[in-house]
Amino acid sequence: MKRVRRLTHFDVLLMTAGIWFLAKFLRYVFPPLFGSFQETYAVSNAALGAAFTGFMLVYAAMQFPSGMLADRLGSVTVITAGVTVAAVASFALVVDSPFAVLVVAMLVMGAGTGAHKTVAVRLLAHAYPARTGRALGILDTFGTFGGVVAPWAVVLAAGVPFALGASWRVIFLAAGVVGLALAVLFWVRVPQRVPTETEGDGTSGVNLDELRRYAALFRDWRFSAFALLTVLFAFTYNGLVAFAPLYLTDEAGLTAATASVLYSGLFLASLVQLVTGDLSDRIGRLPIITAMLGLAALSLVAFVSLTDIAGPVVLGIALIAAGIGSHGFRPVRGAYLMSAIPDDLAAGGLGVVRTLLMGAGAIAPVIIGAMSETVGFRPAFWLLAASVSGATLLATLLWVTAEGGS
């Protein structure tokens, strides 16, 4: 009985995390499907990269507006609407249709999934005020495993006959059904547990004075340098996750199934974030940031350099190491930004930062896709390695000039 009550206490967390799992699954199921999309639609890498960039740009653009809508309508309404929109967009891909339908569905999914994370943080902070950190850690872990499961789902779906069209379409049928089920459960259950999140709190929309004060933060060269560092990292990470499976099949000659398995390892490596966040509290944030970015840079250089001569095991190790560095950086990045932004600007200011950085990273897929068509995949991935190497140099500069190594 006590165990049942304990599980009931975490029902809001589990449903919120379940929706975040689905959101990340939908985002990261597209790159492993690029090869299948080329067979179905006969489109180029550049076109697929542009479509994925559109998904990411819409996702990024939703971060700040979703927070404002939650202030006016309540977190429950915004999260339920977001997952419902994403589920409906998934159903649009269940039957054979033109490439334009795929693009529109991806954009709509970007909007639906983009409405979740910022609002979910607010909801969980109110639902678990004494355990907010733990709740957010579980939320992010669920999301990470959405990326782990996505490539495996592509492998499994490849062997499933589907009456309505190509076998990959069954993935979106399942995602749509799960999304609607989560939306109903969330809408029915969460208001009973957190009634304060069912309606707005009466706050107004955009505070222009606050945005001006946020812009003034960039007058500090250290803040500007860190912002540039995160933009460079985001460019590398988004470009890597968008085209790693296709790179492994086209450049390294691996099978689609092997490439998908290695791709899932990139996300499985994110378990390191449970360690790096705690470690940064003990020895300082900038040392961990520098070490993680350095690991990502060196691993990506090795990944590209060894493409022609190494087998799947070595390439997989390099890709996972790049994932360890990338994911290890992310929680420490958030902690550093929170310490750099004044408390009275943390809400709106951090929302704007998140939108800008994700928007900058979202252009990576279209650039890498276009480069792969014009100069080849190898130069495109060397650009990604150069970008994260630049981020490492900036982190090193911030570390050696910092007071106290924080």
Image (spheres, rainbow, N blue to C red):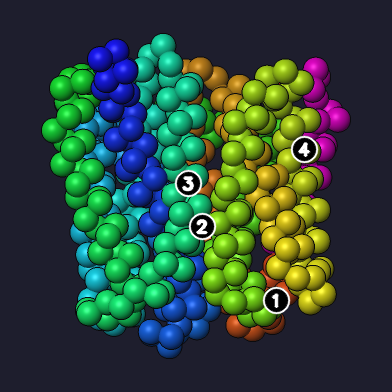
What is the CA distance from the residue labelled 3 to the residue labelled 4? Answer: 25 Å
Residue drawn where x is 50% and y is 52% of the image: 148
Residue 395 located left or right of residue 374? right
Numbered disc in front, either 2 or 1: 1
**Residue 389 forms part of the magenta stretch:** yes
Location of residue 108 with respect to 199 vertically, above or below: below
What is the CA distance from the residue labelled 2 to the residue labelled 3? Answer: 21 Å
Secondary structure type for disc 1: loop
- The residue beneath circle 1 is 252
Mark number, residue 362: 2
Most common secondary structure along the magenta stretch: helix
Mark number, residue 374: none
Residue 230 located left or right of residue 35? right
Q: Quadrant of residue 171?
A: bottom left
What is the CA distance from the residue labelled 1 to the residue labelled 4? Answer: 29 Å
**Residue 121 forms part of the magenta stretch:** no
Quick one: which residue is furthest to the right in this view? 400
Q: Nearer the viewer, residue 98 or 254?
A: 254
Mark nearer the N terminus (2 vs 1): 1
Numbered disc in front, either 3 or 4: 3
Mark number, residue 290: 4
Numbered disc in front, either 4 or 2: 4
- Which amino acid type is shown beneath numbered disc 3? Phe
- The residue beneath circle 3 is 145
Query: Are there few (<14), some (14-19), or many (20+) residues within 10 Å of tag 1?
Result: some
First to last magenta residue range: 384-405
Mark nearer the N terminus (4 vs 2): 4
- Which amino acid type is shown beneath numbered disc 1? Ala
